[in-house]
Image: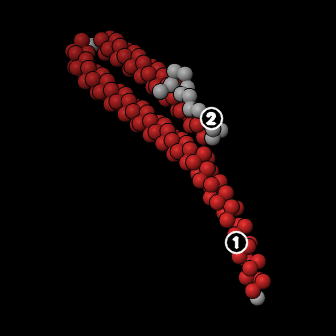
Amino acid sequence: MEETLRQLGDLLLGAIPTVILFLILLAAYRALVHTPLARLLAERRRRTEGALEKARADIAAAEARTAEYEHSLREARTAILKAQEGRRAQMLQAGAAAVAEARAVAGNQIKQAKAALAQEATASRESLQAEAERLAAEIVDCLLRPVGAVYRPAEGGQ
């Protein structure tokens, strides 16, 4: 029994340098790998969430613009309808020829307003789509970038 205890004591005494080296290795791992990696992952998460918030804000702004365009269209239609009512009163007094002419003018104004609004809406959708694609590409790039890579903002981006 005494021999076993002596061997156990020798074994424990021989294990002390191994334990010390293990603790040094653990401290070095934490300082050199774990802490910087955790910091990098936190920064990546913060930037990704920031890009998502910006995309949401851009979408909200585009929706607000769309609502503004729709409101402008309703006002334009209202104004056109009011103008048509005034013209109708005059047309009834002037005769059937004047009625036909005023309707043609109002129809052209509506077509022009619709065409202009359609062009603006198309341009806004294309701009929003391009911005959404750029942000999506930036997010994917951030997510797929190797862990050790240095962050470089895209040229022309924010």
Give the residue at x 73% y 73%: 10
Which kind of residue does numbered mark 2 sit on?
Ala
Q: Quadrant of residue 130?
A: top right
- Judging by the rendered image, the residue that carries numbered circle 2 is 149
Counting from the top left corner in percent of width and height, residue 101 is at 34, 12
Query: Quick one: label 2, few (<14), some, or many (20+) residues within 10 Å?
Result: few
Q: Quadrant of residue 138?
A: top right
Counting from the top left corner in percent of width and height, residue 18 is at 70, 61
Residue 14 vs 134, above or below: the answer is: below
Residue 108 vs 126, above or below: the answer is: above
Q: Nearer the viewer, residue 121 or 11?
A: 11
Counting from the top left corner in percent of width and height, residue 79 is at 27, 23
Q: Would residue 108 be found to the left or right of residue 37 on screen?
A: left
Number of the front mark, 1 or 2 = 1
Q: CA distance from mark 1 to mark 2?
A: 44 Å
Q: Quadrant of residue 81?
A: top left
Residue 13 vs 147, above or below: the answer is: below
Any mark on residue 69, and which?
Answer: none
Q: Would residue 30 be found to the left or right of residue 46 on screen?
A: right
Give the residue at x 50% y 25%: 157
Residue 57 in sight in this render: yes
Query: Of helix, strand and loop, which one carries label 1?
Result: helix
Counting from the top left corner in percent of width and height, residue 69 is at 37, 28
Task: Report the quarter where the N terminus lies.
Answer: bottom right
Query: Of helix, strand and loop, which one carries label 2?
Result: loop
Give the residue at x 61% y 50%: 28
- Judging by the rendered image, the residue that carries numbered circle 1 is 12
Which kind of residue does numbered mark 1 sit on?
Leu
